[in-house]
Image (cartoon, helix red, strand yellow):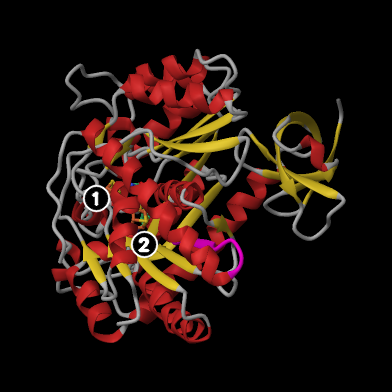
Amino acid sequence: MIKYTAMDDEREEILQRESMEKAVLYVAELEKALGRTPRGCVVTFGCQMNARDSEKLSGILVKIGYSLTESEEEADLVIYNTCTVRDNANQRVYGRLGYLNSLKKKNPHLRIILCGCMMQEASVIEKIRKSYRFVDLIFGTHNIFKFAQLLVTMYENQEMIVDIWQETDQIVEKLPVSRKYAYKSGINIMFGCNNFCSYCIVPYVRGRERSRDPKEILQEIEGLTQDGVVEIMLLGQNVNSYGKNLEHPISFAALLREVEKIEKLKRIRFMTSHPKDLSDELIEVMGESKKICRHLHLPVQSGSNRILQAMNRRYTKEQYLSLVDKIKTAIPDIAITTDIIVGFPGETLADVEETIDVVKKVQYDNAFTFMYSKRTGTPAAAMENQVPKEVVREGFDKLLKVVQDTARSRAALLKGQVMEALVEEVNEQDASLMTGRLSNNMLVHFPADMAMIGKLVKVSLDTCHGFYYTGHIVD
Ligand code: SAH
Ligand code: SF4
Ligand code: F3S
């Protein structure tokens, strides 16, 4: 195990830049051996934070001389940026690793790298060391900023390099980033989580909550807009508690007010809001804003007070519903989406009925429904009353039907309206159509050409297809 000691953030940036210069030489050697530019492939599992981390990893790969590819088969270096929020995310990684090993047999230059949340679990590292010995480099969530340096170590060694930190208080800024989209970008405003919902592994693998300095955030957004970005998504596990622990505390709502002032920026989104911390000030700022999108992702997890308490969510069904009422009154055109877990220990079908009642009352525009997954080390994993699979399935199917019916009826309400869409990409099925995203996060497909990507257009929502629309530009 290689151990580095933390140093201050600026010195760290310099060290990483020096490592990139060194890495360039190794990549040049590889290029000679291959007779072409080496190709790197970054595969992202999990949430928006991981997606943003992947852009940082890609940025460094490009900086040191790799070209990026989406195909693992074509790659000379593959990074799996992993997620461990539910067990099926882990299983997907193990499954695909076997396949990567077969690729390595065909391309001896291929390097395999694992990072992200799953790597923060000791049992995972043990398993990889034992059964996946062909992996070249493993690092975790706390030292991702050392990627360049770790790459150099990897090039200089033959054996598997493992470097996992338990915690960090470092926030290293200003390293290269290669964005997936030219016109929109995620941006971290905070890292980690302090909420310890009893089912959730994120606080253990992402560490304690740390907010970035607002000046750094605003500067980064300013820079992104100079670079053509018109929509940003502010990222944190619980953005509503942003800024509370800074030397000069600032609220999330106050940060949003500052972000709004950035002239070239057209749209602001954020993820995720914990209901217990959503302030009246935030509702006010959203109501007044011309740029904050009409979408709020407000995970409820359950509608049963007994389960909410066991989950350590720190709100009741009634508090959640009255919060939603307040939001809808202040911002009538807002779309509300949520996350729901079915099968938390001790949950009965009567509890699921309570959740269904919340779905009907709130009228969610969309909801992500998950079957509870036992995560080792969390309090819920040690609870004795785990729910049998068939009972989970029954509740899940029942809930899903209501969720889908509600989402469909919400979507249908927009028929015939003209709304602003950000043109995002060519439609996957029909190249004559472009796909745009409405402020409320719904997708609409319409005839347009590729030159429109990144532009805001007015679109008439002509035909509803369940959860999305087709339409035409009316400008
Ligand atoms: N910080 C965000 C959620 C991040 S995880 C928030 O609090 O809203 C995304 C979602 O995964 C959660 O909202 C939850 O619904 C789900 N999830 C988390 N842990 C889970 C588990 N052990 N089993 C099933 N779903 C889980
Ligand atoms: Fe997990 Fe709860 Fe933190 Fe969200 S707020 S990341 S669900 S512990
Ligand atoms: Fe998964 Fe880590 Fe995000 S566990 S959901 S990638 S914070």
Q: Vertically, is 173 above or below 359?
A: above
Q: Nearer the viewer, residue 448 or 254?
A: 448
**Residue 46 is at least partly visible in this image:** no
Q: Vertically, is 7 above or below 221?
A: below
Q: Nearer the viewer, residue 443 or 349?
A: 443
Q: Which mark is residue 83?
A: 2
Side (left or right) of 51 relative to 446? left
Is the distance from the Cβ of mark 2 to the nearest ligand 3 atom less than 8 Å?
Answer: yes
Q: Position of residue 214 (x, y in %)?
A: 33, 21
Residue at 30%, 53% (x, y): give it. 304
- Label 2 vs label 1, nearer the camera: 1
**Residue type at numbered disc 1:** His
Residue at 19%, 74% (x, y): give it. 123
Q: Vertically, is 18 above or below 252?
A: below
Q: Position of residue 161 (x, y in %)?
A: 25, 68
Q: Which mark is residue 450?
A: none
**42 in magenta:** yes
Q: Nearer the viewer, residue 172 or 376?
A: 172
Q: Position of residue 67 (x, y in %)?
A: 57, 56
**Disc 1 residue crowd, few under 14, some 14–19, many 20+, Cα 10 Å:** many
Residue bearing mark 1:
142
